[in-house]
Image (tube, helix red, strand yellow):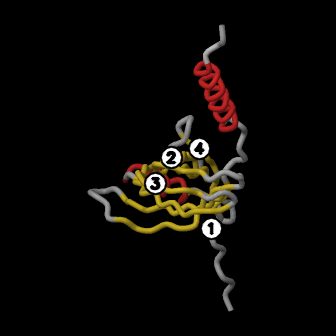
Amino acid sequence: MATPRVPQALLCVLLGLLLGGCAALLPRDPLHVDLVGLEPLPGQGMEMRLAVVLRVQNPNDQPLDFDGAALELDINDQPLASGVSDQRGQVPRYGEALVRIPVSISAFSAMRQAWAAAGHRQGQGLPYSLRGKLAGGLFGGTRFSDSGTLNWPQPLPAP
């Protein structure tokens, strides 16, 4: 009695899908994200709104499709702004894309930051950290982060 061909073909298809799924699990290099702009947006009440413009670079050989983004910005280890966007797009393989995320700064956060900046010593930078996610993909998205120091401009010497 011959074995039916349908189960063998089904097994081959399932094996191919399994191998393709495993390829999606391969580790990816992290995205490189830079803050490249802040654009004013209309706010309500005592809040301030800005569009944070990020340049996202993809050092991988596969494009990154995203459907939504989230962002949090801390300055001097204190929360300053957060926001979300339903923007869709793609960061091409070995390419880059600009992503705009509207963020809100509450009056309380602005006052807290101003208070901290007033007591900050001249010439000493303020640490910042930026955390976010580009949503989509098999496991819910790709997270990114950046941190550094914001340096106050030095006064020009008197002539």
Viewer-nearest of discs 2 and 4: 4
Residue at the location (69% across, 37% down)? 23
Whole-angstrom CA distance, mark 3 to mark 1, is 35 Å
Residue at the location (58% across, 21% down)? 6
Q: Given the image, on which type of amino acid does mark 1 rest? A: Trp
Residue on which disc 4 sits: 142
Residue on which disc 3 sits: 88
Whole-angstrom CA distance, mark 2 to mark 4, is 22 Å
Image spot of residue 153 (x, y percent): 63, 72
Viewer-proximal residue, 152 or 58? 58
Q: Which mark is residue 152?
A: 1
Residue on which disc 2 sits: 79
Q: Earlier in the sequence, mark 4 or mark 3?
A: 3
Q: Do tag 4 and tag 3 residues touch (Cβ < 8 Å)? A: no
Residue 15 lies in quadrant: top right
Q: Earlier in the sequence, mark 1 or mark 2?
A: 2
